[in-house]
Image (cartoon, rainbow, N blue to C red):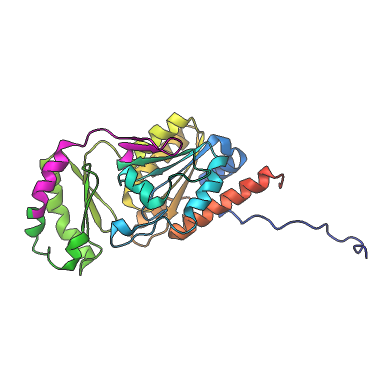
Amino acid sequence: MGSPPNAAPHSSPDPDPVPRPHTPAGRDGLAALLAHPERAVVALDFDGTLAGIVPDPERARAHDGAVAALGRLVPRLRAAAVITGRPAAVAVRLGGFANVPGLDHLTVLGHYGAERWEAATGALHAPPPHPGVAALEAELPGVLESSELWHGSWTATAVERKGGRALAVHTRRAPDPQGAFDRLRAPLAALAARHGLIVEPGRLVLELRPPGMDKGVALADWVRETGATTVLYAGDDLGDLAAFDAVERLRAGGSAGVLVCSGSAEVTELADRADLVVDGPAGVVALLGALADRLDARGAGTP
């Protein structure tokens, strides 16, 4: 039996819709990425963006589907990077990024760019640790004990040692997480200053690390190295504001860019500046998958 007169031709379902940025600059950036993915890069924070925030940092893992989505998307792009305050090797292990088909063009920039891991070779490049970190670590227990709140089971996993390059004090498990964060901030800042370090506040975490490197510096250097003309950056925390600044500077210089916030009620500053807000790591993975679907469909000839 033939088709009825004037019947619409059969068409395959559209690929998963790509979320639409709410700003003109974001829409222009997304259009540039989709039109010329070979000129585009995607850079992502790890904790809170590709992985959920958990009380014990060692239990963090890439969200279900994150690695698979990257494995589909990255081959369509010029390159991709994970930019994190963690040691690069730790992010690779927790993320499951090693030996994954499709991730040859993935770089992990650990310790805000001080360390670098390349998926294509598995090589890890890292300079010597800052001497102030070891000196600070020796003094840290005394400073914490003098705070009068350093007791209870929550303290057992509260200090994260980042490969001799930084230390982080997490208060998420404290009886009063925000109160502990606020009370520790000044003494930890004074301790860091004595050893030529700085304190980087985050989502109920205070990281003590060397100055001079941040995610903005790491992102700008890496984008310049790749020669990309479009960059999408996704993050969730205060430390990602520097990367947002870097993308905005690149846009001011004529590049295209998209700022994505992995939504969090804890850090509204990022959401206020983002072109697109998604629902945490699940939303980031959905975005990566939707971009891969759209590019796959375009590569197959679908308009």
Q: Is residue 269 left or right of residue 146?
A: right
- Residue 84 point in image, percent of width and height: 34, 46
Q: Which quarter of the figure is the N terminus placed in?
A: bottom right
Q: How many labels, in total?
A: 0
- Residue 250 point in image, percent of width and height: 44, 35
- Residue 178 point in image, percent of width and height: 23, 63
Q: Is 88 drawn above or below residue 95 in the view shown?
A: above
Q: From this viewpoint, which residue is outermost toward the front?
A: 99
Per the image, is 168 magenta?
A: no
Q: Is residue 164 visible?
A: yes
Residue at x 36% of width, y 49% of height: 93
- Answer with the quarter of the image where residue 247 lies: top left
Per the image, is 121 magenta?
A: yes
Q: From this viewpoint, which residue is outermost toward the bottom?
A: 175
Q: Is residue 130 left or right of residue 75?
A: left
- Work out whether residue 103 or residue 170 is closer to the camera in this orientation and state it: 103
Residue at x 52% of width, y 47% of height: 71
Magenta stretch: give its range. Answer: 112-141
Q: Is residue 22 visible?
A: no
Residue at x 37% of width, y 52% of height: 94
Residue at x 31% of width, y 41% of height: 112
Q: Is 245 drawn above or below residue 159 in the view shown?
A: above
- Residue 176 point in image, percent of width and height: 20, 68
- Work out whether residue 79 or residue 104 is closer to the camera in this orientation and state it: 104
